[in-house]
Each structure stands twice: as structure tokens, then as C-alpha cells.
């Protein structure tokens, strides 16, 4: 019973910090910082070096904390962080619900994880999550990319006698595949919210709105009517059906933000394969700000140029929330706003963002209400 009481106690289940005093911000001691940094970047308890620095009292110095941040990121154990962050940010686990060959589904799943790991390790600018000339692929994903680009990817020969083999993904420069680049065009992510034969512009639009632009949608009102079903003899295109739904003012509040993003991805089919506009494929639209686009490439250009600040701010928030292992509070906002603005101006990278996080007030201090 005594052991059961310990295991069920809040002190055992939750991470807590040794902070006391009046309401406001209070600095963490070295041991608390060691724990916080290690769980952030390794997902486990601090190693001996972190504990030694904590005991010496030097880990609370910004220059020492930054040096340890680099050490933890350079250690292979940090792959836990890059993988978990990618999975939580992009909802990647939905890919595993896909049907098809196991090794292909595994490649679709691993691709965004490898890409996010690359962004962080090579300190690539934050906006490259949306627009990059680098991806990771193997020949199971060959149909999604130009044959010229695939020449740089080594072929994999399955060893005899093995039925299931993990085929490694290799870095690939997107020189000839101009319709790919960034997480929005990764086939596994595009296929997550699609049916077997039809895309779902609404689900895709919500995913982009929430995961990339950081615009959280409220629950739809109870009296919102369902998507209209065409009457007998009424020939409506897929898009016209949704436009009819959006004509309801109650529906338009959200759908005016969701639909342009979702239909802007119609150049990619249910399985994420690229398809040209025309013959029933219409990726044109207009953003809520009035910017018109004729296809996905023009939509991506609008996102990179006009929504750049919003995307960078969203990524800053998501990194802070992951590092702090909690929802963001009002007192976190000034620090996040300041860092996001600086990164927008200076084209800051992901590794630099992590360093900004671990030396920031919300990370190095605890807030007592």
C-alpha cells in the first residue's frame, strides 16, 4: 500500500519544480533546469554531466545552458525530440491508418519526421517548413517525384529470405519536381484526411489552418446544417456543393477560412499524387484577405510571402508549448511575440529557436499565481 501511494502521488506522476515565494516569476535552480532541458530534448532524466553542472551551480548561467543545449541536440538521443515534435505538430500518426504496402506506408510516415529532423539539425529558416528544395525519399515513394530527382536516391535490394525490410530514406534535392517542397506537399500528410477515391478539402483546410497558421477553430454551432446533398437531377461539382453550404452565413464564418486552403490542395489527389488543374480538378480560389490564386503553387507563394509572419509565430508557439510541456499562458505571450518578430526579420532557424526557448524567461523560471 505504501508503494502504491508513492506511485499514485502527484509528486511522482508530474514534474514539479522547487520554487516557493510570492506570486510572479521565480528562477529555477540547476537541478530543475537539468530536468527541464533533458526532458525537452531527450525525453528522459538528466545525464551525469547535467547533474554535475547543476550541483556546481553553473547550469543557470546562460552560456553554460546554451552549450549544454548544443550538446544534447548533437547527441543521437535528441532524435526522440525531433520525432515526437514532428508527430505532435503534424499529427503524423494518422498516416499509419492508411492502407497499402507496409513498407510504403512506413516511408510515408518517416518522410516528414526525417524532414523536420533536417530542419532542426541544419538550422534551416522556419519558413522552409512550407517551401524547401530538400526532401527525403526512397524508391517506394518514386511515383511522387521526378525520375531525374530520383537518380540521386540509391536503390535498395531486398536481402533474400526477409519479407519486411525497413528501406532507408535518403536526402533528395527537388530540382525537377517543382510541385513538391515542404510539409504541405508530402504525400503521406496529404493522404491523411482523404477518402479512398475523393479528397476532403474541409479536413485538409482545417489541418493547414490549425497546424501551419495556428488559427484554432471553435466547435461548429449545433444548428449548422449538414453539407447539402444535390437534389435529383441537380448536377453540381464537388466545389459547387461546398459553395452552396458556405452561402449560409452561419457556415461562412469558418468555411471562408477553411475552404480556400483545402481546395487549394486539390492539385493533389486522395493518395497525395500530383494532378494538373483541369478535367474536374480546380485548385483556384481566394483567401479571406482577397488574394486570388489559380493553383497550389500560387497559393504556396501567397502563404510564404503574405502569411510568413503568422507561420513563424505559429512555429514559435508550438516549440514553446512543446518545450514547456503545457499550454501557453498570457504571461508567455510577450516573450513569444518578441522572438517571433525577430525571427521574421532575421530569417531565424529552428536550432536557433530552440536556444531562444531554453534561455527564455518561461523556460528558466516558474510562474506562481
Image: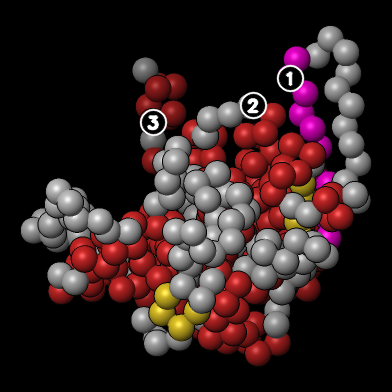
Kindly report which numbered mark, 1 or 3, lies closer to the viewer in this rendering: 1
Residue position marked by numbered label 1 in the rendering = 164
Residues under labels 2 and 1: Cα distance? 8 Å
Name the one closer to the observer, 124 or 173. 173
Residue with the most extreme left position: 223
- For the point 80% across and 63% down, the residue is 176
Image: magenta residue range? 163-173
Residue position marked by numbered label 2 in the rendering = 102
Residue with the most extreme top position: 161
Q: Position of residue 311 (x, y in %)?
A: 54, 74
* The disc label shown at residue 8, or none: 3
Tag 1 secondary structure: loop
Q: Is residue 230 visible?
A: yes
Q: Position of residue 354 (x, y in %)?
A: 67, 67
Name the one closer to the observer, 306 or 346. 306
Q: Give yes or no for residue 317 being in the magenta stretch.
A: no
- For the point 58% across and 56% down, the residue is 275
Amino acid at each position: 500500500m505504501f508503494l502504491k501511494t508513492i506511485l499514485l502521488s502527484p509528486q511522482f506522476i508530474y514534474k514539479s519544480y522547487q520554487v516557493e515565494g510570492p506570486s510572479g516569476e521565480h528562477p529555477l535552480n540547476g537541478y530543475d533546469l537539468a530536468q527541464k532541458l533533458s526532458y525537452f530534448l531527450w525525453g528522459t532524466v538528466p545525464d551525469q554531466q547535467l547533474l554535475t553542472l547543476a550541483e556546481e551551480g553553473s547550469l543557470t548561467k546562460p552560456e553554460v545552458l546554451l552549450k549544454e543545449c548544443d550538446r544534447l541536440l548533437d547527441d543521437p538521443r535528441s532524435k526522440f525530440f525531433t520525432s515526437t515534435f514532428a508527430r505532435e505538430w503534424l499529427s503524423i500518426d494518422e498516416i499509419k491508418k492508411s492502407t497499402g504496402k507496409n513498407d510504403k506506408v512506413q516511408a510515408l510516415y518517416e518522410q516528414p519526421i526525417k524532414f523536420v529532423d533536417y530542419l532542426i539539425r541544419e538550422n534551416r529558416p522556419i519558413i522552409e517548413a512550407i517551401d524547401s528544395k530538400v526532401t527525403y525519399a526512397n524508391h517506394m515513394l518514386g511515383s511522387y517525384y521526378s525520375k531525374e530527382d530520383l537518380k540521386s536516391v540509391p536503390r535498395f535490394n531486398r536481402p533474400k529470405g526477409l519479407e519486411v525490410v525497413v528501406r532507408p530514406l535518403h536526402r533528395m534535392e527537388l530540382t525537377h519536381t517543382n510541385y513538391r517542397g515542404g510539409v504541405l506537399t508530402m504525400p503521406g500528410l496529404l493522404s491523411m484526411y482523404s477518402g479512398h477515391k475523393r479528397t476532403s478539402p474541409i479536413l485538409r483546410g482545417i489541418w493547414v489552418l490549425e497546424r501551419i497558421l495556428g488559427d484554432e477553430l471553435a466547435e461548429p454551432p449545433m444548428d449548422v446544417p449538414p453539407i447539402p446533398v444535390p437534389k435529383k437531377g441537380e448536377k453540381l461539382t464537388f466545389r459547387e456543393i461546398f459553395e452552396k453550404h458556405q452561402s449560409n452565413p452561419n457556415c461562412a464564418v469558418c468555411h471562408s477560412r477553411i475552404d480556400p486552403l483545402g481546395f487549394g490542395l486539390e492539385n493533389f489527389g486522395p493518395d497525395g499524387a500530383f494532378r494538373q488543374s483541369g478535367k474536374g480538378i480546380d485548385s483556384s480560389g481566394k483567401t479571406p484577405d482577397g488574394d486570388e490564386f489559380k493553383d497550389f503553387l500560387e497559393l504556396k507563394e501567397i502563404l510564404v510571402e503574405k502569411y510568413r509572419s503568422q507561420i513563424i509565430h505559429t512555429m514559435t508557439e508550438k516549440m514553446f508549448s512543446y518545450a514547456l510541456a503545457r499550454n501557453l499562458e498570457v504571461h508567455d505571450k510577450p516573450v513569444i511575440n518578441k522572438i517571433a518578430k525577430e525571427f521574421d526579420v532575421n530569417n531565424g532557424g529552428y536550432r536557433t529557436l530552440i536556444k531562444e526557448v531554453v534561455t527564455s524567461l518561461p523556460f528558466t523560471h516558474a510562474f506562481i499565481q
